[in-house]
């Protein structure tokens, strides 16, 4: 098939590249000229494992191209995906200006019937409203389908080729059939294609993200209670996780969730509930528990030092909102760093992928260290915010030699607590016992 993808970010670039790898001809379009020039020059604007090689292969084999020219690129396309950002707007709801702008441009340029596929995460009713807006512009017949994306940054390519399911909302069976054809190569019995009404498909994405965010906020609240009562969250997790109704996934305590999806999608659902006057108390709590959780690590550090860290050197390992990505949107690390700076500490940060983005925000207020160990030079404490694999089994001996004081605040419970204690460190995790 001939496919155009509008919006060449994490979702658009991964989807476009993987669809081209399945044998389709794909043009990835973006209004950001610098991003498109970079891709045309063979460079990848984001860090996503495996993506660079797959882009290069499909460009070389002539199935993948990049453009800023939307009208020309959608000419003759069977499917036009919309994968632009839908960030949080001022009201708390999703800002759909990007989706409307693309819809308008597509409608103005449409010469032959096509199917527009909304891949961006959008509130229920967006499919219907986009159809209405575009119909007012173009006499050319078109369909609008909804195909929410469930990929995880850091594992996006694997998620594309092995999705848990593909959800498609379409008003006509022929449209669902067209998308079934597109996805058929990656579908199996266990990886089904689920066709439904667009409203249900739109809602599915929010329900999925809000449930995942709820699990995180739930276990974080339980971990905080463990701290309050001297219980150990690792034991409690084991105690509940073997119950097959509960399981272990997404029940790991930490410094709060971040990223470009959970925070904004949780707030968008709260806004959607307000718009129809239906209570949404659980999801409101998920959001406020998460805001509280981002403060737990800074508070832990301040409390440990009796309320003052002025002039101290604090090392921060991990800046991305999770491992295997360079994405720092709503990362708990940003909250921690700001609080440490406000309290007068000198902050030395390190991250294998996300340092460039953090430098854009904090500039010379931080010291940027290429290796985790150089961040520890004469440090009074170490705080871990992202559980990159490379931090999980550090050289404690070397850390002892480098640090001025031996205290670790583990915001992801990613270190072996016993090993840290044995190496002579004081250690505090989230919901892990603090030795007296
Ligand atoms: P992103 O910010 O990385 O990329 C969006 C791209 O769209 C940018 O490159 C931007 O320049 C481009 N764009 C915006 N307006 C445009 C326009 N009018 N014309 C052409 N290009 C335009 O965003 P993302 O992380 O890829 O997310 C895209 C959508 O997918 C969002 O709705 C998000 O909620 C959803 N989503 C994201 C993820 C994820 O893990 N990132 C997962 C599932 C769903």
Image (tube, rainbow, N blue to C red):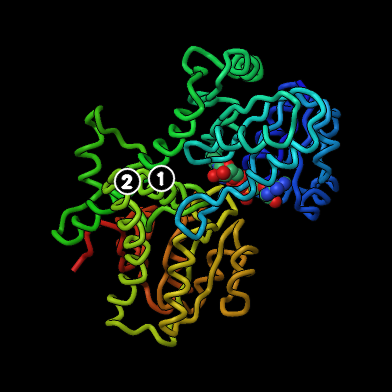
**Looking at the image, is mark 2 or mark 1 nearer the viewer?**
2
Residue at the image point whose x is 49% and y is 81% from the top: 346
Q: Is residue 294 above or below residue 201?
A: below
Q: Which mark is residue 272?
A: 1
Image location (x, y in percent) of residue 250:
36, 41
CB of mark 1 near ligand 1 (< 8 Å): no
Foreground residue among 383 and 104: 104
Residue at the image point whose x is 55% and y is 51% from the top: 95
Quarter of the image where one finds residue 160: top right
Q: Are marks 2 and 1 in contact (CB under 8 Å)?
A: no
Indicate the quadrant containing the C terminus: top left, top right, bottom left or bottom right.
bottom left
For numbered disc 2, what is the local secondary structure? loop
User: Which residue is identified by label 2?
Assistant: 277
Foreground residue among 138 and 35: 138
Image location (x, y in percent) of residue 46:
67, 50
Residue at the image point whose x is 86% and y is 29% from the top: 62
Q: Which mark is residue 390?
A: none
Residue farthest bottom in this picture:
311
Indicate the quadrant containing the N terminus: top left, top right, bottom left or bottom right.
top right
State which tag comes first along the sequence, 2 or 1: 1
Mark 1: few/some/many CA within 10 Å (<14, 14-19, 20+): some
Residue at the image point whose x is 43% and y is 39% from the top: 206
User: In the visual, does 69 lie left or right of 165?
Assistant: right
């Amino acid at each position: 098939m001939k496919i155009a993808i509008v919006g060449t970010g994490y979702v658009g670039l991964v989807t476009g590249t993987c669809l081209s790898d399945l044998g389709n001809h794909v043009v990835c379009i973006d209004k950001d000229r610098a991003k498109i020039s970079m891709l045309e020059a063979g460079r990848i604007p984001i860090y996503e494992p495996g993506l660079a090689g797959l882009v290069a292969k499909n460009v070389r084999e002539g199935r993948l191209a990049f453009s800023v020219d939307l009208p020309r690129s959608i000419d003759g396309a069977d499917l036009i995906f919309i994968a632009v950002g839908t960030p949080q707007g001022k009201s708390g709801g999703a800002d759909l200006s990007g989706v409307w702008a693309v819809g308008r441009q597509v409608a103005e340029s449409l010469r032959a019937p096509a199917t527009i596929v909304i891949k961006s995460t959008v509130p229920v009713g967006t499919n219907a409203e986009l159809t209405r807006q575009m119909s007012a512009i173009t006499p050319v017949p078109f369909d609008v389908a909804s195909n929410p994306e469930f990929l995880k940054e850091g594992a996006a390519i694997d998620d594309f080729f092995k999705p848990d399911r593909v959800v498609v909302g379409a008003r006509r069976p022929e449209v669902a059939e067209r998308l079934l054809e597109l996805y058929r190569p990656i579908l199996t019995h266990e990886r089904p294609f689920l066709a439904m009404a667009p409203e249900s498909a739109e809602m599915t994405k929010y329900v999925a993200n809000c449930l995942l965010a709820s699990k995180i906020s739930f276990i974080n609240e339980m971990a905080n209670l463990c701290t309050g009562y001297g219980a150990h969250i690792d034991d409690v997790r084991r105690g509940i996780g073997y119950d097959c109704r509960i399981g272990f996934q997404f029940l790991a305590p930490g410094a709060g969730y971040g990223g470009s999806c959970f925070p904004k999608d949780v707030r968008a659902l709260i806004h959607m509930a307000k718009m129809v006057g239906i209570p949404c108390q659980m999801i409101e709590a998920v959001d406020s528990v998460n805001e509280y959780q981002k403060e737990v690590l800074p508070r832990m550090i301040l409390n440990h030092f009796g309320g003052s860290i002025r002039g101290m050197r604090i090392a921060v390992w991990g800046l991305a909102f999770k491992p295997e990505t360079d994405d720092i949107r709503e990362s708990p690390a940003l909250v921690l760093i700001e609080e440490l700076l406000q309290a007068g500490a000198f902050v030395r940060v390190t991250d294998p992928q996300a340092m460039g983005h953090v430098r854009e925000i904090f500039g010379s207020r931080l010291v940027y260290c290429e290796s985790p160990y150089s961040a520890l030079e004469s440090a009074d404490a170490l705080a871990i915010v992202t559980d990159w694999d490379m931090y999980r089994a550090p050289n404690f001996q070397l850390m002892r030699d480098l640090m001025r004081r031996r205290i670790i605040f583990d915001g992801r419970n990613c270190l072996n607590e016993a090993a840290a204690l044995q190496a002579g460190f004081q250690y505090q995790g989230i919901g892990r016992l603090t030795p007296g």
